[in-house]
Amino acid sequence: MNRLSALILILFVWFIPACMPAPAQYTELESGLLGVEDSQSILIQVDHGEVIVLGTEEQQAQVKGQVLFVDELEYQVRSTEEQISIKAFTHRKGFSDIPLRLEVRVPKQRQVKIETDSASVSVQDYEGVLEVDSTSGIITIEQLAGKITLYSNRGNITVRESSGNISIVGNYGALNVQNVYGETAVSTIMGNVVF
């Protein structure tokens, strides 16, 4: 009887994901253009999915994206005198498809902060102040100049072809630094560091 119970339990656990509703297709998020004042910083908060940040010469921030399970999305774009805040929480972890794809174009020479749980973060062609704080997301930085602060507890961090004052901290992930110029500090507890 114990073997039968164990077999039933294993089959039950294995088939539960098959019973979850499958998403139809990605739904486009409402795109937006926001004028950015010199005094405003930009905060991007995403729990799970993919965040792409690109620098632009325009004095506007542009937000666009796609989401699965749109009914469960918590999405908000706000602008105050001090900050533009972009928040997108899917509340979907461990799903085989990417639950959210968010692309944000930001004016150069601004202060940008990105906070994620497990979302991957890619930032390209940006100049200014950048801070990325992720629990387990993969962080990839390419062609940045300025003050760059990156932290991931369990995710990998890669910095390529960037310059400035760069700080990279990871507890357990791989830290990969390629063609970086300026003052660079890299530290880890249990991860690997590759230059």
Image (tube, grey):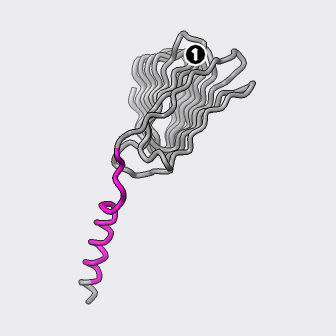
> Which of 24 and 5 lies nearest the eye of the viewer?
24
The amino acid type found where label 1 is placed reads Pro
Identity of the residue furthest to the bottom in this view: 1
Image quadrant of residue 82? top right
- The residue sitting at 36% across, 49% down in the picture is 23
Specify whether 128 is left or right of 170: right
Residue 51, image x, y percentages: 47, 33
Image quadrant of residue 158? top left
- Residue that carries the numbered disc 1 in the rendered image: 107
Taking the magenta stretch, the answer to whether it contains residue 187 is no
> Which of 180 and 45 lies nearest the eye of the viewer?
45
> Which of 52 and 136 lies nearest the eye of the viewer?
52
Q: Quadrant of the C terminus?
A: top left
Can residue 138 be seen by looking at this rendering? no
- The residue sitting at 39% across, 30% down in the picture is 194
Taking the magenta stretch, the answer to whether it contains residue 14 is yes
62 in relation to 168, above or below: above
Q: Which residues are magenta?
A: 5-24
Identity of the residue furthest to the right in this view: 81
Q: Alpha-carbon neighbours of circle 1 within 10 Å: few (<14), some, or many (≥20)? A: many
- The residue sitting at 57% across, 14% down in the picture is 108
Predominant SS of the magenta segment: helix
Residue 39, image x, y percentages: 72, 18
